[in-house]
Image (cartoon, helix red, strand yellow):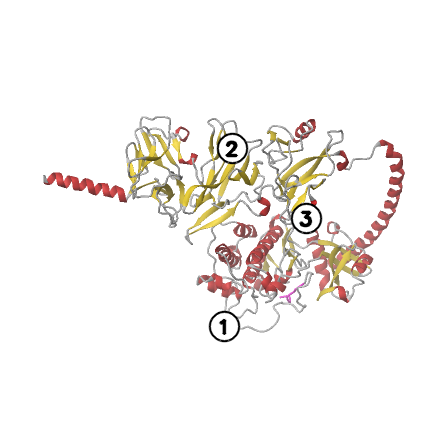
Amino acid sequence: MEVITRSVFVTSLFSMFLCCFSLEDILKANQTIRDGSTIVSSGGHFELGFTSPGNSTNRYVGIWYKKISKHTIVWIANREAPLNTKSGLLKLNSRGNLVILNGSDDEVWSSNISQSSNNPVVQLLDSGNLVIRDENESDPGKYLWQSFDKPGNSFLPGSKFGWNLETGLERYHSSWISEDDPAPGEYTNHIDRNGFPQLMLRKGSAIHFRAGPWNGVRFSGMPNLKPNPIYKFDFVFNDKELYYHYELVNASVVMRMILHPLGYIQRWIWIEKLQIWQLYLTVQMDDCDRYALCGAYGTCNINNSPACGCLNGFQPRNQQEWDVADWSSGCVRKVQLSCADGEGFVKHSGVKLPDTQRSWFDRNMSLDECKRECLKNCSCSAYSNTDIRGSGSGCVLWYNELIDIREHKENGQDLYVRMAASELAKKGRSKLRFIIIPILLAVTLMLGICLWVIRKKKKQQREGIRKLYSENDGGNGNDDEDLEMPLFDFTTLAHATNGFSVDSKLGEGGFGIVYKGLVDDRTEIAVKRLSKDSRQGLKEFKNEVSCIAKLQHRNLVKLLGCCVQEGERMLVYEYMPNKGLDSFIFDKKQSKALDWPMRYSIIKGIARGLLYLHQDSRLRIIHRDLKASNILLDREMNPKISDFGMARICGETETGATNTTRVVGTYGYMSPEYAIDGIFSVKSDVYSFGVLLLEIVSGKRNRNFTHPDHNLNLLGHAWRIYTNGKVLDLVDEVITMLSYEHQTEVYRTVQIGLLCVQQYPADRPTMATVVLMLTSEIPLPQPKEPGFFTERKVHEGDSSSSLLQSSSSNYLSVTTMAPR
């Protein structure tokens, strides 16, 4: 009797052990998992058992991350059939079906497998996939059932999003009702197979957002889907399958995509050091991602005001509605199509392709064949390539109104819209030739005379420039290439600036005066007029003409031309109405206009401009005088790097250190190796950018920075509070009510700034890495101590290292140190 009692006790104890601890990763037929026990994948990445999401008291069978401190559920079985007690049971029955039973042994959920197996087992894989398979079968293609086919709201690496065309199985995502209720919510995300396949997010039955078709590189409406070092992605489209998937490049990264209860498609990455999920990107970017915001034949550009406009050749269907920002009725053709000879196509570049639900496609046709196919059918309204790689391939045709177009200038594609002959600006009919020809001859003669006069004046200016260069270079320079830029006539600039009047004056420096001008009564310009007795400006004049004239980037000030005539030397730039960045961040009143999102946008803009100089431009350029006053702001507060008088041109692959005997720049922004030893490289600019970044965050100058607790400069102060974990104390006091997302951005930005100002150039990141750090959520290394991190005595005085006047006016100042 005693032996029997002990046996029963041991059996009971073993049962309690199973209830309270994790089992292996496999569950066999007729084995069960009760509430409180779990199974764990072989690598320990995922765990399955009964759980309650958020603040819910209901119980669900789900899968969650095992090694992450924050309980994060990635899949739930019984989303629509929760248990209200902890008496539930998960079981693999003898027929090979995984079932959930309530306390009364009633089945509330089943995997519903119709195919039988002799030895079925359930296994939780390290990918997060729960599979039912035959015990002796490990081929993924022969799984009897898998949770990846019923993904819920989460999209894990390695899973497929789309269709099995042979079986008709669709794998799509559906949102939860809320963080506490995993039942299917309002939003579903599908690969839509009507017409040319495209990604669509619906709210109920209505289209909420459309990422568009796959174009060989990305979904047409997802410009932020780019190659990166964290994950790789692909789209498979063949006779058997149609799906999108992604894989992690680094197995140590934890990443997931979710469909938020409010309809946002978001990608999150786990930051182990901070023990938080950090948002990597949100697919929907702005209002232009609202489906059909601008109606038929409307196009959306978030940088315009208003954002909606009509395609060329179209006008609002209802102008009154359009004037009050109701664009839903869209646009109509100014001239209707008649299927007559002479109709053709207008090319629209850099756009998200229209809705393809009612389109036709052939992935093997060329673009010319596509055009001919569209012309054959009077109902065809537009055509485009299906694949933009290389020179393009494939054909997609639209037979209906064009809906949901937006402009993506950098990552969009070409769309060819059918237009009436009169809209294509065709030549007149033959009966008008005898009238047009004499007029053309007369106009041609007049143009010829005008061109001769203009060329003569330009020749005089070019000779003046060559003479100026020869004086600087000892007569040995060959600067023909430097002359490839517009030349302004002295009379034109004098008229534009009201005779260089005092009222037109913007500012003044050691080189001379900068004036505001108006060309053709509509184009605002800034004219830098070098002083005739300023020898300092000659070398800088040549340098700017040589450098900036060849640079084209939205974050660089554009040089419109120059003038060397009648003893004058002038440079003409685009006008920057908001002047210098220093006039905002270092001014107590003006700084209130720069909230955190605006400052962060400015930081990213400066970084992209500097990356272009270092890596992407035709010439590799080191700026050597990057500072707040040399960042000018346009009407929309977009930053533009200016003042290339001190810049140095390097070879296409030259990035190494160069020694100079003429150290130029501004104290507080110069890197240690440059200020002390005269050695400069692209890493010198990175250091200056780091200083500028910390100044933008704090609203304080690095040079002459003071603090009651120490005599450190701004870099030292930033390093001190970073090591003490009080990064938010660095933020400009005018910035209030920082959201959690913005706090995370501030922390990351300060860390990037400290990485840029490290003592040794080899430790500093390149600008390519800096841009990646600012625009993604890749893990950051820990910074080392910054350069010039020492206690010092603070003296009053200007932060510039030159005797020139400091100014934030709309021109390019020249700041020079005394030679070593």
Q: Which amino acid does label 3 sit on?
A: Asp
Whether pointer 2 and pointer 1 mark residues with C-beta atoms closer than 8 Å, the reply is no
Is 76 situated above or below 790?
Answer: above
Q: Mark 3 points at which residue?
A: 323
Q: Where is residue 445 in the image (x, y as percent from the top left)?
A: 88, 43
- How far apart, in angstroms, are the residues tagged by discs 1 and 3? 56 Å
Q: What element carries label 3?
A: helix
The answer to which quarter of the image holds residue 662 is bottom right
Q: In this view, does 708 lie to the left or right of 537?
A: left
Residue drawn at x 87%, y 34% as measured from the top left: 433
Is 92 situated above or below 668?
Answer: above
Per the picture, the main secondary structure of the magenta-coloured stretch is loop
Q: Is residue 520 left or right of residue 310?
A: right
Tell me the quarter of the image containing the N terminus: top left
Q: Which numbered disc, 3 or 2, marks the residue that appears first in the sequence?
A: 2
Q: Name the residue under label 1.
A: 708
Q: What element carries label 1?
A: loop
Q: Give the range drawn in magenta.
A: 814-820
Q: Position of residue 559 (x, y in %)?
A: 71, 54
Between disc 3 and disc 2, the foreground one is 3
Which label belongs to residue 236? 2
